[in-house]
Image: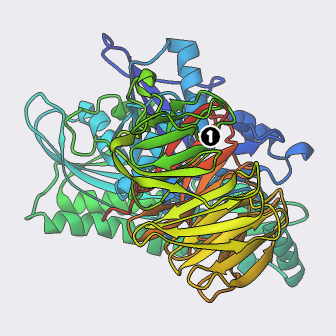
Amino acid sequence: MIVSVDVGASTTKAAVLAESGPDAVTVRSQGLPEWPTALVLGRDGTLITGTAAANLRDAAPYKGRYLRDLKQQINLAARTEPLHREVHFPSGDTQPLVRGVAAVLAHTLRAVKEQYGDPARLVLTHPVLWTDAEQVVLTEAATAAGHPSARLVSEAEAVGLHAVRRLPGDGPFAVLDFGASTFDFALLDRRGDGPPEVVYETGRLIGGDDFDTRVLQLVRDSATAEERRVIDELAMTRPELLRREAEEVKRALTVRGEAGFGVWDLDIAVHRDDFTNAIDPLVTTCVAAAGEALSALDGTRPRAIVLSGGAARVPQVREHVAGLAASLGAELVDLVDGVDGSPVALGATRAPARSRTCRTPRPARPFTVDPAVVELGHPEAPVVGVLGGVLELRPEREVRGWPGTGHGDAGQGGAIGTDGPAMPVSRIAGDPASTRVVLASPSPAFLVTTVDGTGGLGRSVVFGRLATAPGVQGSTVSALACRGLLVAWVETDGRGTIVDTLSWHWRTFPLPELVSELSFTDKPWLIARLPDRLLLFDVLTLRRRAELDLPDSAALAVEPRHGTVCVAYEDEVVAYRTGTGSFEVRWRRPLRSRGAIAFTHTGDEAAVVAFDTTARVYRALHADTGDQLGLRDAIGLDRPDALHPSPDRGVVYARAGTGLDRLRLGTVSV
């Protein structure tokens, strides 16, 4: 069974086609052939959609928690691609755009399953103007709804696939589809018994919602000063109420010469002639785009013009399209009314796999999660990301290397040996930009080695052993870091050491308190975390340059190349620059991460990845500006206890208990 879903800007429609059935059948939910493409956000974060959402929108518990602009949010031109956008409810709450669309699809697919069983294939429709950047929202939402192999087809082509059953014979025909947010045009050509093929498509971001906006403008222009005050107040507090009334007026004007706009105490008349004049430029723009496209196609004259879409119920649209058909000597096929269901959804069930619009889109910037790629041996074992995987320090003081692809056998991990007797390990540290790893023993002694491409230590590549000068009896390493040729550590007796492994030059410096974390930056600075603050040292002089108060509950992430320090406080993430030898605030962003934060690089671009516990999403933020680069829904995944950086490009590991998920932020493709 094939299921098609048309997620419209106003309503959602669906159809099913049985493998042995001659005709597609319209899916009904609660007896209706369409239902609102709307969301209500429950207090527990649950998304309610469809007719239930429309019924709850005015209920007191859901005040400010109703939204119906999902498709319009995808249409918007913005710096952030739709895959990484959020929808904003009037209450101030946000939800990932993909999660909202997934809720609409899941609701529809439940209705299908209840009536027809599980579908074998899923086809989704989209406006012709949508590129991969917009289309990938649908495929990601389908994956979240349990259908990772959904196919896509343009709405105009889908209408053509339905209309062709009413058009005997071969030859070209055109489709003009007027939806709630977009106008779609397609020229199709049918040859023989096969489905028609798309010759050309174009469109405009104009639809019935724009007609509603013109109604509201007419109402405001006709209102008294007091009525305008009421309208402005409603626009701030109850915008959905104004939009619903404007839509009702628009529908009334399709059959009457006058309609009243009546909400609260308002009663303002809107005349069809004024409405016709107000929307005429919009209608003319759409029909002219179709005419210009046909003129540019070497004089191709379609044998028929197919009209569809809810906005085409406006008489002026029909008149303009009828005029275009007459000028071309083409038959007008009107699918606006008289069709049991949506021509888009019905036609999409017959979308051929070879259709040029029926393919898998790719995001401009992928942000993926591979769940449970590594299963650690202990929930509190220290972890270091290395090229190709991770190193785990087991409670028995041995190191195991695990590939980070998720495709290897867990049994491939193993204890790491050295040249000679096995060395017990108390601390591990890795260079975020190379294959170098340092292992510290309780003695303390150190092994500097490299990592191979599978996440394991190279047994035959040993640079040497380091041993500290005699110290306080029982002193061990409390913090360890390496960067390039430099290795630094601090012992529990408060003594810090930096070693250049090329010249073997040793330097020591005292620390006033126990140090729990060490990080290098390329300035070069050394950053040390004490119980209640951060200290910034000049690596060349070992002079203390700056200090930053830091609560014990805050998580720390250091980006070594540019020296950006990110601190995850209880309610916000703050980025500090250290290039001038001080902690200067670069940006701050409200965000509750509970310690799950880490840096990564995508080529020359640095990003900080943080888990947002409120929205249950991973956010990738630009290291220099804090702008959102990526958003990944984490519903269905365990909340991470921590994030671990990796030298692998764009990779961060999310740790929840003993499981590691692999996140990867891609570069922007052009």
Question: Residue flagged by tag 1: what amino acid is it?
Answer: Arg
Q: How many marks?
A: 1
Residue 369 picture location, percent across and down: 50, 42
Name the residue that disc number 1 marks.
Answer: 655
In the foreground, 201 or 570? 570
Q: Residues within 10 Å of mark 1 (few under 14, many from 20)?
A: many
**Residue at point 41% right, 54% down?**
464
**Residue at point 41% right, 40% down?**
455
Q: Is residue 252 visible?
A: no
> Is disc 1 placed on a helix, strand or loop?
strand
Which quadrant of the figure has residue 528?
bottom right
- Does residue 322 appear to the left or right of 431 in the view shown? left
Residue 127 picture location, percent across and down: 39, 52
Q: Is residue 537 above or below residue 77?
A: below
- Does residue 628 appear to the left or right of 268 in the view shown? left
Residue 424 picture location, percent across and down: 58, 37
Residue furthest to the bottom = 580
In the foreground, 244 or 366? 366
In the foreground, 222 or 22? 22
Q: Is residue 482 visible?
A: yes
**Residue at point 39% right, 54% down?**
435
Q: Is residue 34 above or below residue 287?
A: above
- Does residue 555 appear to the left or right of 228 in the view shown? left
Position of the C terminus by quadrant: bottom left
**Residue at point 35% right, 28% down?**
349
